[in-house]
Amino acid sequence: MTRTTDNQADVPAPTAPHKDMKWIGRSVKRVEDPKLLRGLGRYIDDVVLPGMLHAVVLRSPHAHARIVSVDAERARRAPGVVAVLTGPEAAEQFGPLPDSGPAPDKHVWRVLAADKVHYVGEGVAVVVAENRYQAEDARALIDVTYDVLDPIVDPIAAAEDTGNLVHEALGTNVAYERTFTFGEVARDFADADLVVRDRLRWGRQTAHPLDTTAAIGDYDAGTGEMVVHTNSISMTWLAFGAAVALGIPSNKLDLRPYISGGSFGSKQFCWRSTVTAAMMSKITGRPVKYVEDRLDYQLNGDQHGSDRYYDVELALMRDGTFRSLKIDCVDDYGAYIQFGVGSHGNALAQVTGPYRITSTEYRVRAVLTNKTQQGAYRGFGADAGNWALERIVDKAAAELDLDPADIRRRNLIPPDAFPYHIPSGNMYDSGNYEPVLDHALQRFDYDGWRRKQEAMRAEGRKIGIGVVTANERSVYGATEFWFWFDDKDVPVKTTSTPEGVSMTVDTVGAVTVTLYSTPFWGNSSDTVAAMIAAEEFDVDPADVSVVHHGTKGGLPAAGPGGSRLTVMLAGAITGASKKIKDKLRRIAAHDMEVDEADLEWVDGGYQVRGATDSRRGIADLAMLAYLVKTALPDGEESGLAADFVYDHPHLTMPKPDRSDLGSFYPCVGHACHLVAVEVDEETGSVDILDYVAVHDSGTLVNPRSYDGQIVGGTAQGIGTALAEEMTYDAGGNPLVGTFWDYLIPTALDVPEVNFGHEETPSPITAHGIKGGGEAGRLMAPGALSAAIDDALRDHGVRVTELPATPERIVGWLQGQGG
Amino acid sequence: MKPPPFSYHRGRTVEHAAELLRELGPSARLLAGGQSLLPMLNLRLAEPAHLVDLGSAPGLDAIRRDGDLLVVGATARQAAVENSADVRSLVPLLAEAVEHVAHPPIRHRGTVVGSIAHASAVAELPCAALALDAQLTLLSADGVRTVGAEDFFTGAFTTSARADEIVAQVAFPVTGPGTGQAWSEFSLRRGNFPVAGAGVSITVADGEIVDVAIAICGVSDRPVRARAAEAALLGSRPDPETVAAAAAASVAELTPRGAGDLAAHILPVVAAPVPAWGYRASVAKSQVRRAVTTALTRAGGVR
C-alpha cells in the first residue's frame, strides 16, 4: 500500500501483545530440523543429474590489469574437458549481470571479465569437464597475458584520482556522492551546548555460510527451457534479470530453490553462480554444476560487507539530550556496485537510532577500488551505522561524565510518540524502549556488575562493561532502490516488494502452503509458514505441508532479505487463509442452511454462534468442496485453493527534493545488549565474561528460533568486533582467503547469551510481527567496543576501528592511535 | 580445491615405505595423518607426483616407555598422545602442548611425529620437542640415524632429514622428581596456530633452579631455545621479578623479523596478515613468563 508522506492517519495505534493465539508465540521445534539433522536435507551439492558436468573459474591474480589475450587451447585439449569459455567470448554471447548501481552502463558488470580485470579473483574463464579434478587440472593450462596496471586500493586517494580509474567510462572512481539534509541541521548545531566529533573505521568483512553459493544449469535445447537449481536467487519478482543475461525468454527460465547452509545476506541476489552454470549448460547442452570453493566465494562471490570511513558529529545539550547528527561516510565498494548504495538506505532507515534527534545531515561517497565488490551481509550497512551512532553516544557520555545507560535513557523516543518519524523520513511503527533497557539492566545486574568491576579493577584486572540501545529496521521498501536519484533520473519508481503464497486445503482438510521464496537459509521459512497456517486453521504445524515453487509461473515473491520474511509470509498466509476460510464459511452456511453472519470459526470448523452441537469441521467442509458439487452454493467453484500476494505494509513516497525519503523500512524493533569483558594487556585478548541481550521485535512467532537468530547474529557481531577482517595489501592483493586467516568465531569463542524478550506489536503487520533476523549483529559490535573502552579507560584507549584485534589493542595501549 | 594428479603408494612396513621413497625420488612425499599435506595438495601449494602412505604400516603407532625415554611412533595420533596417561605423567609438557593443536577432529587424524617433521615455525609440537631435547630417529633405505631436535629444525618447513628419510619415531626424556613443565600460548582464535607460544621444563632442587629449558615458537623461521632466559634462571632462587627479567631476556636476544619473513615462516606461498614483529615479541615475552611461572609452581619451586 503506497501512501503519501503527509497522510499518516491510517496508521493504527499500537496494540497490546496478542495473548489468545494457539501457536504464535509458542516455542516450537523447527519443522525443517528433522531432515537437516539426520542428513536428509538436499543441499545443492547433493544434486546429481545424469550427464552432469563440473565448472571451475579461472580467477585473476592481478588487482588491476588489461587482458591482452586468453589462450585456452591447451585447456580445451586436456583430458575430460568439454568446454572452455573465456571472458572475451562470454561478452559476445551473454549480457551483463543485473546491476542496480548508478550508471550501470559505465561500470558494466559481467560474469567473466571481458577486457580488464578489476580485482584479484575476478573470473577470466570457465572450464567445464567431466569431473572437478579434470576441470581444475585444465584451468592451470589456460594462458592469460595481462598488461598490469597500477592498483587502486585506498578509497580516499581513489576518490580524488582522475587518472587511474577502475572503470574508465565512468570518468571517476566516485560512483555516487550526495549530501542529504533532513531538518534544521545548521540551526540545531548552532543551538547546541557542545559538539562531539569522532572519526571511525569499519573494516571489511564477509558472511560465511556453511555452504558457498552454487547452481546447476540444465538447458533443454529442444524446448529452449532453462532450469537452474540454485541455493541463491529464486525470487520470481526479479528473475527476468537472469533471463536477460542468459538470452533466454523470461518465461523459459525456472530457478528452483534449495535449502542452504545459511546466507546471512551473502546469497541475496547472487547472480554469478546461476549465470555461470546456466550459460555453460546452454553451451554444452548438458547439466553443469558450479559450486564455488571457499576461495571463489571469498574472492569472487560478490558479497563483501560495508567498508567505511566515518566522520561523525553529534550536537547535544549539557544535560545530555541530543539535538542533531552529521555523518560523512566514504564507503569502499570495491570494483562494482551491484546494489547501488542500498546499504546506506539501511543506515538511513534508522540513522538516529532509538533517540530523539531532530535533524540529520548524511553525506555518502561511494568509491570504487580494485577489490571484490560489496554485497549484503546481515545488517546491510545498518550494522556499521548502528556502531557509528553508539560510538558517538558513548563519547558524548564520557565527555559529560554521564553513565552510558543514563545518557541513552534520557534520549529514548517515548512510547507515546509512535508512530514516530525520524529526520530521514522513515517511520518507526511502534516502540516502548525504556522497558527493554530496564529489563536488560536488571537481567545483567548492572549495579552489581559495576560493583564487581570496581573490586576486580582494584586487583589490577582490566574489566569493562558496555551497553548499547539500538534499533533494527525490518521489511524494506522498494523506494530504497531509487530515492538516491532525482525523480527525472529514475526510469521506474518501483514501490513493490511482494511476497506471494498459494494455499490449498485438500479433500480431507490437510493444509499445504506453497512459497515462492527461498527455502531454509537458516531463517526457518517452513516453520514460520506452518505456524501461521496452523494458527489460521487450528492444525498442528507439523501437519502443514510446505512446498517451495520455482520461479517459472510463480507468484511474485522477493524472498528473504532485510528481515522481511516472517512479516511478509505472515501477511500473505493470513490473506490466503482468509480467502479459503471465507469460502468454507459460505459452504458451511449453505450446507447448514443458516446465515453466514451467524457462523463463527472455532477449533477448526464453523459453528453457529454459541451452539457447539451445530458445526461443520474443516474436513467435512473440504469433502463437500471437492466431492459434492451439488452441496455448494450456486456459482461456487469446486476445491479449496487461494493465492495471495502481500505487499509492503507501509511505504510512502520520498519528497522530490529528498529532504524526506518517506517511510521505507517501517517495522522497527529495538534491543539492548550489555556485556562485561576482561582485556589482557599483554596479548590484547578480550574475554567475554557476561552477555545479556534483550530484544523487542514485536509479536514473537517462535521464541526458540528467534533466540537462535539472536545468538547467531551476536556471534557474527563478536567476529565483527574482535577478529574478522578482509584485508588487502598496498598492491590490492587480498591477505585473507581461507579460514586460516579469516577468523570467524567458533563455539569456543562465543559466550552463552542470556536472552530476554519484550513485545511491542507492530500496528501495521499481521499479528503485530516485526522482523528480527539481523538483530544480534546490529548490537554486539557497539557493546563490545564500549566494554573495551571501559576496560582500558585508565589508558585513554577508545575503540575507533573495527575489528579491535588483539594486535590493535596492544598497539593502542602502546599509544599508537585508537 | 581438488589435488592435482598423483600416484598413491601404500607402505606395507616403514622399511618398505623407505624403499619406495628411495625408488620414487624427490617427487615423492610421505603421507601420515595428512592434516598438513592434504590441505596443501587441495590448494595446489604442493604438487608431488607420488604419495607414500605410512598409515597402514604396522607397529608405528606405539606410545611406549623405553628406560628414561618415552617413545612416540610415526603414526601415533595426536589424540592418542593427548589421552595417554603415560605421556601425561612422564612428559607433561608434550601432553599440555598437544591439547593446543587445532581441534579434536584434527587431532584424531594428525600425528605428533608428522607435525614435528612438518617443522612449522609456529606449531606447538616442534617447539615442545625442542624444549624437551627430543631425539628423532630417521630411517631410510641406508639405515637408521638419530638427530636431536635442535639439529633437526633448520628453517621454515625445513629440516636436516633428507627427502628419502622417514622420521620413524621421536623419543622424549621422561621427567624426574623436582621437574615442572608447562606450555603457554596465545592464538587469535582457539585452535589456531599461536601468535607465539613457549614450552618450559624446569627442575628445582632445594629452592634453586638446577635445570631449565625454554623454547619459543612464532618468533623465527623455526622454534628457538631462549638461551639468555635459561641462563638468567639457572642457579637462581626465582621470584616474580627474576622470572619477568628472564622473559624479557628471552625476547631481547631474538632477531626482529619483517612481515614478509614472518609470513613465509608461517605458510609457504600464500600471503597472510600475520601479526607484526613487535606484537609477536610482546606476546612471546608474556607466554615465556606465564609458562615459566606455571612450571615453577609445578616443580614446587615458586615462592
Image (spheres, coloured by chain):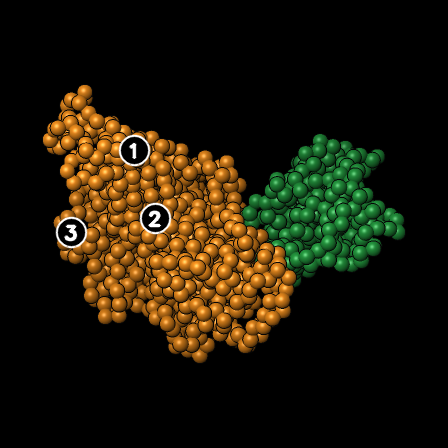
Chain colours: A orange, B green
Can you identify the residue that label 1 sits on?
A507
Same chain for labels 1 and 3? Say yes or no.
yes
Report whether residue A375 is seen.
Answer: no
Q: Is residue B98 above or below residue B195?
A: above
Q: Are marks 3 and 2 on the same chain?
A: yes
The first of marks 3 and 2 along the sequence is 3
Label 1 or label 3, whichever lies nearer to me, is 1
Residue A8: image tag: 3
Percent position (x, y) of residue A740? Answer: 58, 52
Q: Measure how far apart labels 3 and 2 are at the Cα level.
A: 31 Å
Q: The residue under label 3 is which amino acid type?
A: Gln
- Please tell me in which quadrant of the rendered image residue B112 appears: top right
Label disc, if present, on residue A516 of the rendered structure: 2
- Above or below, comparing residue A200 to residue A718 in the picture: below
For mark 3, name the chain: A
Secondary structure of the residue carrying numbered label 3: loop
Towards the viewer: A567 or B87: A567
Q: From what the image shows, is residue A530 above or below residue A77?
A: above
Q: Nearer the viewer, mark 3 or mark 2?
A: 2
Estimate the spatial distance between the alpha carbons at disc 1 and disc 2, rounded to whole Å: 24 Å
User: How packed is label 2: few (under 14 Cα within 10 Å), some, or many (20 or more)?
Assistant: many
